[in-house]
Amino acid sequence: MINMLNTIFESFNEAIRRFEYDYIYIDSIFLAIWLGFLIKYKKGNAIKFGIFTGFVTYFIDAILWWNAPAGNNYPIGTMIREYWIGGVKVPQSLGAYFWPKFGADFMMTFSYSLFAFGWLWIMFENYVKRNYKEMMLFTCLFFGFWLVTPFLSYFVQLDDSLVVSVRHMDTQMITWTVNIVIGYLLFFIIYVSGKFKKRDIKLLGYVFLIGCLGAFFMEFPLFISGIRPTGIYFLLYDTILMFNQGTPYLYILYAEVFPYLTKKIKKNKHSEIELLA
């Protein structure tokens, strides 16, 4: 029993994806359709939010983790993020692999953010608006696109070069845990304790739930298609923890920080106009 538990917990440290390169092309097509729906329904703020978080996730994943050592449990020279494309390990110097790696990075950071965090913004908006048709539309599009992408990749033979992406996370687990604890503690103080806002316990549950759903919408298609070969326990683990690392912070940005900055910018512009007049 103890050995089994150790094996399960150790599997959390290795986030692996195995997919064909045309997965990236298909994802890009669905991303264009997704953006088309966001534009049609005038979700400019959701797009901006996705772009903003895209830069953040790109920096963490494609730059920071790509250049950060995986830790003492791995051979010297092993970084947190590693790629194999077409059976060849992508070197740190990149060379001819710059664009193939960029394509994979774009799919897993910018495309991911425009989908997941654009959807998250819409879910935040609709906590108050309660536009259930809108919530259902964008949730079905989001989950539906991600659900069919891996299977289309198997049947459409555009580029069957195998991409293996590995994220060695044993040095990051403490950070993940601390992020969630601090994030939801801060959220509790602001929205549940009654010290700063009207107490809203339902909001806490709602934010946690959509945090779980956002992660599930990504992990479940990877799990059932075999792209993520880490098993059911990893699916459950990532569903609870992965997206919820950032969800409470992002809600605070959405509800408190961005409105404050927008108001501040408008006030400054108004002051400049008065001075010019």
Image (cartoon, rainbow, N blue to C red):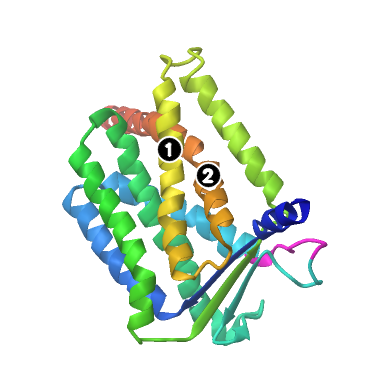
List x then y, in percent, for residue 74.
Answer: 79, 67
Magenta segment: 66-73
Image quarter hosting the C terminus: top left
Please name whichever residue, 156 or 66, is drawn nearer the observer in this view of the structure.
Answer: 156
Residue drawn 33% across the image and 82% down it: 155
Residue 67 lies in magenta, yes or no?
yes
Using the rendered view, name the quadrant where residue 26 is placed.
Answer: bottom left
List x then y, in percent, for residue 40.
Answer: 16, 53
Q: Is residue 209 above or below residue 242?
A: above
Question: Mark 1: which secondary structure?
Answer: helix
Q: Is residue 203 above or below residue 154?
A: above
Q: Residue furthest front?
A: 1
The label on residue 240 is: 2
Asked if residue 253 can be seen in this view, the reply is no
The Cα atoms of the two marked residues, 2 and 1, are separated by 9 Å
List x then y, in percent, for residue 202.
Answer: 40, 24
Label 1 Cα neighbours within 10 Å, binned few <14 / some 14-19 / many ≥20 = some
Judged by its main secondary structure, the magenta piece is loop
**Which amino acid does the dot numbered 2 rest on?**
Ile
Using the rendered view, name the quadrant where residue 143 is placed.
Answer: bottom left
**Which amino acid does the dot numbered 1 rest on?**
Leu
Q: Is residue 209 above or below residue 86?
A: above
Residue bearing the label numbered 1: 209
Question: Mark 2: which secondary structure?
Answer: helix
Horizontal relation, residue 40 to residue 184: left or right: left
List x then y, in percent, for residue 24.
Answer: 40, 74
Using the rendered view, name the quadrant where residue 209 is placed.
Answer: top left
Residues at marks 2 and 1 touching, judged by CB atoms closer than 8 Å: no
Label 2 Cα neighbours within 10 Å, binned few <14 / some 14-19 / many ≥20 = some
Residue drawn 45% across the image and 56% down it: 54
